[in-house]
Amino acid sequence: MGSNRVLPAAEWVSVSRLKEKRMQTEERRPPRPGLGPIDLGPLRELVAIAVEAEMRFHAAKSEYAISMAALARAARERPAERREMRDPSPAIRVTRQTLQTFAVVGTQWTASELRVLFERKDCHGHRISVSHLLLLARVQGEERQRRTEEVFADGLNLRDLRRRLRAGTGSQTA
Amino acid sequence: MRPEPELESHPRRVRARTDEPTPLRDLVATAAEAEARLHAAEADYALRMAAVARAARRGGATDNSAARACASALGITRQTLQPYALLGMRWTPAELRSLLERQDCHGRRVSLSHLLILSRLSHTERCRRTEEVFAEGLGVHELRRRIRASQRQAANLRDG
């Protein structure tokens, strides 16, 4: 109840001084465990190595998706050449279904578009996955462009994106 | 469009820039190379994450603050980091490396998801299931299905 009371000007000054004082005190106070700045201590080096490994892993995933998309697209566009070398799937040890998945991605985006998409990070610092692209491939033109921007702006995971596509609703913030 | 300097050294990609379409055979070879690089990167990532998770757990902090700090620095949740601690505890780095390099009866390699599932099993069960994965070329879904089925069976026997 007291918090709703309108304070006179003199009291506002004292409240702001109190806040300033508190801020000065809090600077000296040690951060609560888990809530303060990250202090990795001896683990810092291991974490740095893991971060690098994650970046390499992501780059490899992107390159794999791009090369598979190019292959799947070519295999679909050139059936005669595919027949000539039978089915390319055994050579890369994936099922026909997996190759078809990449064909969907390969026919909707060019290699350079895919590279740009895979390098972008959403608001949470996460990157887009092939599964996101498969969902986005279901919509066309401006709708796809809008949904793609939503994924990055709102940090949508697969479930959220699927739900929004089903409901046909847009971003709450847009 | 941004320049792609790294592609200049790649003969197949350079050819792709001309009007002449890249032969399917070349695309298969490129994809196979990319697959091999992806697998190596995945194995390396698993090993590094297992090392971090193991070290964070060994730190002895009872409030999980070390694991939380590491997860935060890696941009993942503590719940995502935790399974890697299991990987680190179940297998030594050398064992993990050899598991990730081994190929099954179809010539496929075991994935990180396989290992995360296997790490939750007891030692005997883990060894048996690991051999099953390689001998029968089990996918992640099939492995998970078999484990669930055997756990259900065991529970039914226990309950009479």
Image (cartoon, coloured by chain):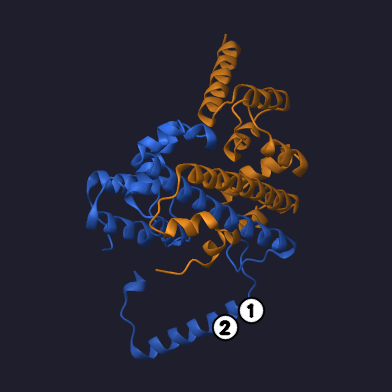
Query: What residue would you read off at disc 2?
Result: A24
Query: Which of the pair B57/B51 is nearer the observer?
Result: B51
Q: Indicate the amino acid at tag 2.
A: Gln
Question: Tag 2's secondary structure?
Answer: helix
- Residue assigned mark 1: A28
Drawn colour of chain B? orange
At horizontal 33% and vertical 87% (from top left) the residue drawn is A8
Left or right? Give the position of A149 relative to B42.
left
Residue visible at 58% across and 18% down in the picture: B150
Q: How many marks?
A: 2
C-beta proximity under 8 Å, tags 1 and 2: yes
**Which quadrant holds the C terminus of chain A?**
bottom left
Query: Percent x, y for residue A27?
Result: 60, 79
Q: Residues within 10 Å of mark 1 (few under 14, many from 20)?
A: few
Element class at badge 1: helix
Residue B120, image quadrant: top right
Q: Residue at x 62, y 42 (%)?
A: B83
Q: Residue A111: which quarter of the image? A: bottom left
Camera-side residue: B82 or B48?
B48
Q: Report x, y in % for residue A90.
A: 52, 32
Quadrant location, the N terminus of chain A:
bottom left
Q: Which chain is blue?
A: A
Chain under label 1? A
Residue A114 position within the rendered picture, expressed as x and y whole percent measured from the top left: 41, 56
Which mark is drawn over residue B69? none
Seen in the image, is A76 located left or right of residue A67? left
* Chain ID at mark 2: A
